[in-house]
Amino acid sequence: MASAFITVRRTDSGRRYVGRHRLGGRAYPIAHGGSFRTLREARPPRDFIAGELAVGRNPADALRRLRNKQHRTIRQRAEAYKTSRVDVAEGPAR
């Protein structure tokens, strides 16, 4: 059965909370889900991973998509907004 959990690791700088998960039962390897300074920071990623496991998707794919997400500039957002306004006449759009 797939599972997501948090373990504590002691380092020179203090405690670290490491999110881990398995895609299946005990025969599957444990995968890394992130390392965080506080338990409060570690819980939302663990819950996200558990949600992905619940619907049968690989959380590594979703996490990779989130990390590689391209951010649009304000100029790009303004241009997209301007082209989406089909109810504005040509004169006011200038």
Image: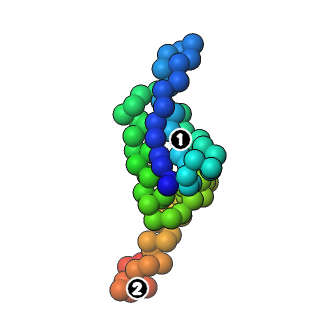
The vertical placement of 4 against 61, above or below, is: above
Q: Residues within 10 Å of mark 1 (few under 14, many from 20)?
A: some
For marks 2 and 1, give the one nearer the viewer. Answer: 1
Residue 77: % across, % down: 48, 64
Residue 7 seen in render: yes
In the rendered structure, the answer to whether residue 40 lies left or right of residue 7 reads: left
Report the residue at 41% width, 28% height from top.
38
The vertical placement of 21 against 14, above or below, is: below
Look at mark 1 in the image and give the residue it sits on.
20
Residue 80: % across, % down: 49, 71
Report the residue at 55% width, 52% height from top.
25
Sequence-wise first label, 2 or 1: 1
Look at mark 2 in the image and give the residue it sits on.
86
Residue 81 is tagged as none
Q: In which image quadrant can residue 62 be found?
A: bottom right
Residue 66 seen in render: no
Q: Secondary structure at mark 2?
A: loop
Report the residue at 48% width, 26% height from top.
8
Q: In which quadrant of the rendered image does the C terminus lie? A: bottom left
- Most foreground residue, 44 or 92: 44
Residue 9: % across, % down: 53, 24
Amino acid marked by disc 2: Val
The vertical placement of 80 against 35, above or below, is: below
Q: Secondary structure at mark 1?
A: strand
